């Protein structure tokens, strides 16, 4: 698992998509994310890991439940879908840069 719990107290942490997200989908490792963040929305949408609040007294039971009910097929499918989206956005970006300079 890849730890990416940064909290959600500031815009800088609640809106970021860290490099660890991309590491998670490339290396196929579930991600730990803070609730009420954009990263949590992505994790939930694509089934990329579990959303945890370290201050929650149920932190370990929630993590244990995730581990014990881990659905590898669902995780891999979400990882591949998200990675496909990132690759298509990267291609579009590069195409637009080339278009601008030509």
Image: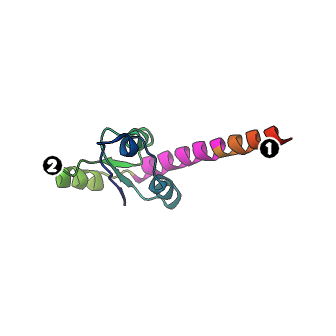
Q: Residue at x 27, y 55 (%)?
A: 68
Q: Which element carries disc 1, helix, strand or loop?
A: helix
The quarter holding residue 46 reads: top left
Write down the residue under mark 1. Answer: 98
**Image marks 1 and 2: residues in contact by CB distance under 8 Å:** no
Residue 31: in magenta span: no
Residue range highlighted in magenta? 72-89
Q: Quadrant of the C terminus?
A: top right
Please tell me whether residue 8 is drawn above or below residue 5 in the rendered image.
Answer: above
**Residue 86: percent from the left, percent from the top?**
59, 45
Crowdedness near tag 2: few (<14), some (14–19) or many (≥20) residues, C-alpha within 10 Å: few
Write down the residue under mark 2. Answer: 58
**Residue 45: percent from the left, percent from the top?**
43, 38
Q: Residue at x 38, y 54 (%)?
A: 31
Crowdedness near tag 1: few (<14), some (14–19) or many (≥20) residues, C-alpha within 10 Å: few
Q: CA distance from mark 1 to mark 2?
A: 50 Å
Which of discs 1 and 2 lies nearer the camera? The answer is 1
Pick whichever of labels 1 and 2 is earlier in the sequence: 2
- By secondary structure, the bulk of the magenta-drawn segment is best described as helix
Q: Which color mode does the image show?
A: rainbow
Q: Relative to residue 33, is residue 87 drawn left or right?
A: right
**Residue 8: percent from the left, percent from the top?**
31, 43
Q: Relative to residue 19, is residue 66 drawn left or right?
A: left
């Amino acid at each position: 698992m890849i730890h990416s719990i940064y909290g959600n107290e500031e815009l800088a942490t609640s809106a970021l998509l860290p490099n660890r997200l991309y590491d998670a989908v490339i290396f196929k490792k579930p991600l730990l994310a803070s609730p009420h963040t954009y990263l949590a929305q992505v994790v939930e949408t694509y089934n990329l890991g579990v959303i945890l609040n370290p201050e929650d007294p149920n932190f370990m039971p929630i993590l244990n439940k995730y581990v014990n009910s881990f659905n590898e097929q669902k995780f891999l499918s979400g990882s591949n879908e998200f990675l496909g989206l990132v690759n298509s956005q990267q291609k579009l970006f590069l195409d637009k840069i080339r278009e601008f300079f030509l």
